[in-house]
Image: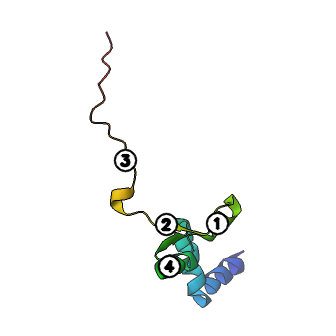
Amino acid sequence: MALGQLSACAMVAAYPLTAASVGTTVTTGKSLTDHAASEGTGHDCSVMRVFEGKNVCEKRLKPSEVPVQDFSRQQRVVPK
C-alpha cells in the first residue's frame, strides 16, 4: 500500500504540469488549456461547454455588463 502512495507522489513530481492542471481545474472549473484559450481569444473559453451543447468560447462580460439585482428598494416584512 505504501508503494502505491509513493508512486502517486512520484507521478506528481514527474508531471508537474498535470498536477497544476488538475489543481487549476478543481479550483476554477477550467483547465490550463481553457485559461490559455481565454487569454488568447479575449473570450471566456471552456471545453466542458461542448457537453452542454454550447460554444466553447463565449463573450467575456465587462463588469458594467454583469446583471445585478438591486435589493436596496425592497420592503422588509415584519411579522405582526
What secondary structure is found at the residue carrying circle 3?
loop
Residue, disc 3? 68
User: Which amino acid type is marked by label 2?
Assistant: Lys
Whichever of callouts 1 and 4 sits on the residue coming sooner in the sequence is 4
Q: In this picture, is 6 found above or below 56? A: below
In front: mark 2 or mark 1? 2
In front: mark 2 or mark 3? 2
User: Which amino acid type is marked by label 3?
Assistant: Val
> What colouring style does the render use?
rainbow
Residue 63, image x and y in percent? 34, 60
Which residue sits at x=52%, y=73%?
24
Residue, disc 2? 59
Whether the residues at callouts 1 and 4 have beta carbons within 8 Å, the answer is no
Residue lying at the far bottom of the rendered structure: 14
Q: What label sits on residue 41 in the rendered view?
A: 4
Distance between the alpha carbons at the discs numbered 2 and 3 = 18 Å
